[in-house]
């Protein structure tokens, strides 16, 4: 990865994997506080076709980050299984 920012937000973690002989990139952004004490992490999947984004929410920044990691891990495993 060339830098640690995507659309002005800081990237916490990313993973690149192959899907249908094309690279797919999973990205987790830094948690941000929203709605009082609630936190969220943006989760992004980028392919050559486009980009899909969703959020994982938690009662604090650590929970939001943990849920984001679990969410992307499940989506990556599903994508790999669909290729088999």
Image (tube, helix red, strand yellow):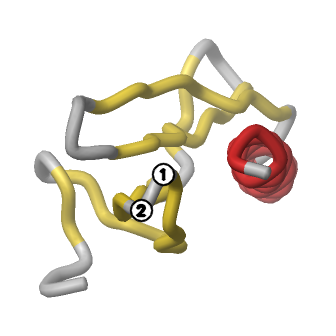
**Residue at the front extreme, as displayed:** 84
Which label sits on residue 41?
Answer: none
Q: Position of residue 32 (x, y in %)?
A: 50, 42
Check disc 1 and report the residue beneath it: 20
Say which element carries label 1.
loop
Q: Is residue 81 above or below residue 11?
A: above
Kindly report the distance in space between the C-alpha atoms of the residues bearing marks 2 and 1: 4 Å
Quick check: marks 2 and 1 in contact, CB under 8 Å? Answer: yes
Q: Is residue 48 above or below residue 18?
A: above
The one nearer the camera, 22 or 26, is 22
Say which element carries label 2.
loop
Which quarter of the figure is the N terminus placed in?
Answer: bottom left
**Residue at the bottom extreme, as displayed:** 2
Q: Residue at x 60, y 13 (%)?
A: 35
Check disc 2 and report the residue beneath it: 21
Q: Residues within 10 Å of mark 2 (few under 14, many from 20)?
A: few
The one nearer the camera, 65 or 71, is 71
**Residue at the top extreme, as displayed:** 35
Q: Position of residue 41 (x, y in %)?
A: 58, 42
Q: Residue at x 53, y 73 (%)?
A: 15
């Amino acid at each position: 990865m060339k830098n640690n920012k995507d659309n002005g937000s800081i990237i916490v973690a990313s993973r690149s994997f192959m899907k249908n002989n094309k690279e797919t990139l999973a990205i987790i952004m830094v948690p941000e506080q929203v709605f009082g004490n609630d936190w969220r992490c943006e989760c992004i999947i980028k392919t050559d076709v486009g980009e899909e984004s969703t959020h994982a929410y938690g009662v604090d920044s650590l929970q939001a980050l943990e849920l984001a990691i679990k969410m992307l891990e499940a989506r990556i495993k599903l994508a790999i299984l669909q290729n088999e």
